[in-house]
Image: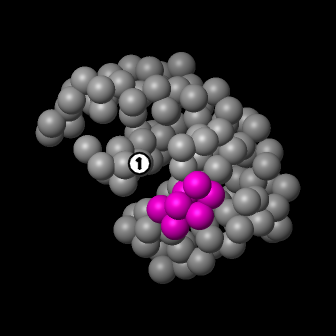
């Protein structure tokens, strides 16, 4: 799988945290990778591991987002936008293999695909303040 495809799978799985407790996410991850069309062991483990790391930093990520998203606390944000911002912010802060510009660009692309018409500019604006 390409990095873009992996990121999209991470986004899809991470989105589930809005509907399931953190405790249920391990099971959700296992169910998710079972239904991948071509679940290569390495890719499936990469997806699950990345989601685990993001979930471990979720409170810290949300605090950072709340500090810069004036008038838009995480509780009020669209869940798609919030999930994309969490993923990109994690990549910016903790994933040394992904340059900041790439993380932001990929987040905007996810926002174009999964968000509303306003999502790309909102995601870009929040991430620009965080980067």
Q: Is residue 113 above or below residue 91?
A: below
Q: Is 19 or 6 nearer to us in this picture?
A: 6
Q: Which residues are magenta?
A: 99-106
Residue 79 seen: no
Residue tagged by mark 1? 7
Give neighbour class at mark 1: few <14, some 14-19, many 20+ (Cα, 10 Å).
many
**Left or right: where 75 falls relative to 82:** right
Q: What residue lies at 49% left-to-right and 33% top-to-bottom?
A: 51
**Above-or-below relation of 44 to 125:** above
- On the image, the x and y values in percent for residue 105 come to 52, 67
Q: Is residue 120 magenta?
A: no
Secondary structure mainly formed by the magenta segment? helix
Q: Position of residue 85 (x, y in %)?
A: 60, 56
Q: Is residue 36 left or right of residue 46?
A: left
Where disc 1 sits, the SS reads: helix
- In the rendered view, tell whether residue 14 sits above or below residue 83: above
Residue 100 belongs to magenta span: yes
Residue at image position (54%, 72%) is 119
């Amino acid at each position: 799988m390409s990095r873009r495809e992996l990121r999209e799978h991470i986004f899809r799985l991470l989105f589930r945290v809005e509907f399931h407790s953190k405790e249920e996410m391990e099971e959700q991850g296992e169910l998710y990778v079972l239904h991948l069309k071509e679940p290569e062991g390495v890719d499936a483990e990469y997806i699950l591991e990345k989601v685990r790391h993001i979930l471990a930093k979720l409170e810290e990520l949300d605090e950072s987002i709340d500090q810069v998203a004036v008038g838009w606390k995480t509780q009020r944000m669209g869940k798609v936008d919030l999930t994309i911002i969490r993923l990109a912010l994690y990549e910016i802060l903790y994933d040394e293999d992904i340059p900041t510009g790439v993380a932001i660009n990929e987040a905007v692309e996810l926002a174009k695909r999964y968000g509303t018409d306003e999502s790309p500019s909102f995601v870009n604006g929040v991430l620009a303040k965080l980067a």
